[in-house]
């Protein structure tokens, strides 16, 4: 009888440690962030958001002390403001020149090359993510990613 109880205990502990269907929520990281130096009262921002988690995330807002920030999507050459962008589970959202991107309007000041612009990314049901956008030359093009 003792062997049966011992074997049952080992089996229960083994099964408890398996964690079979445990999934993780979104696990976000940001890379490749930058802003080309603005040449007018508007600016653009680019970055890549990676999601290593098992659930999608939704970027719903971007805020900055620099000015109003809106999220834009480019589709077929036409740019339009959107209320959110998805960051797929085990995938990325790439904000790049010619594609989805951030637009800064009514700039409080015009940032210069070498400075950084702090922004806050807001996601549905997640804590905000703070990001610094380094200001690059107006003609800057990354070699990969964005």
Image (tube, grey):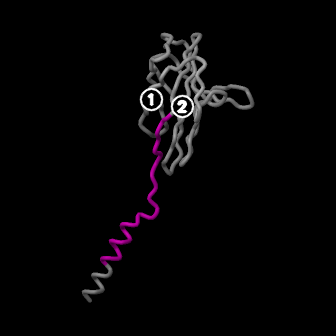
Specify the farthest residue to the left: 2
Residue 90 at x, y percent in the picture: 54, 48
Specify the farthest residue to the right: 76
Element marked by disc 1: strand
Element marked by disc 2: strand
**What residue is shown at x 68% (from left), y 25% (from top)?**
79
Frontmost residue, 130 versus 143:
143
**What residue is shown at x 33% (from left), y 71% (from top)?**
13
* Residue position marked by numbered label 1 in the rendering: 131
Residue 19 at x, y percent in the picture: 41, 63
Task: Tell whether position 57 is magenta.
Answer: no
Label located before the other in sequence (1 or 2) = 2
Q: Quadrant of the N terminus?
A: bottom left
Specify the farthest residue to the front: 143
Q: Quadrant of residue 74?
A: top right
Q: Residues within 10 Å of mark 1 (few under 14, many from 20)?
A: some
Is 138 on the left-hand or right-hand side of 29? right
Frontmost residue, 112 versus 43:
112
How far apart marks 1 and 2 lie (CA) works out to 10 Å
> Tags 1 and 2 in contact by the CB under 8 Å rule?
yes
* Residue position marked by numbered label 2 in the rendering: 47
Task: Point out the stretch of residues depicted in magenta.
Answer: 9-31
Which label number is shown at residue 30?
none
Task: Tell whether position 12 is magenta.
Answer: yes
Residue 131 at x, y percent in the picture: 44, 29
Q: Quadrant of the C terminus?
A: top right
Frontmost residue, 115 versus 57:
115
């Amino acid at each position: 009888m003792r062997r049966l109880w011992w074997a049952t205990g080992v089996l229960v502990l083994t099964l408890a440690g398996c964690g079979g269907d445990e999934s993780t929520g979104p696990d976000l990281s940001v890379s490749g962030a930058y802003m080309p130096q603005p040449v007018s009262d508007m600016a653009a921002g680019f970055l890549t958001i990676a999601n290593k988690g098992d659930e999608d995330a939704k970027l719903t807002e971007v805020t900055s002390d620099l000015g109003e920030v809106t999220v834009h999507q480019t589709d077929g050459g036409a740019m339009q403001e959107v209320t959110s962008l998805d960051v797929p589970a085990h995938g990325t959202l790439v904000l790049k020149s010619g594609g989805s991107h951030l637009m800064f309007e009514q700039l409080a000041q015009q940032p210069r090359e070498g400075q950084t612009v702090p922004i806050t990314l807001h996601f549905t049901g997640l804590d905000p993510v703070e990001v610094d956008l380094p200001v690059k030359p107006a003609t800057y093009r990354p070699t990969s990613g964005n």
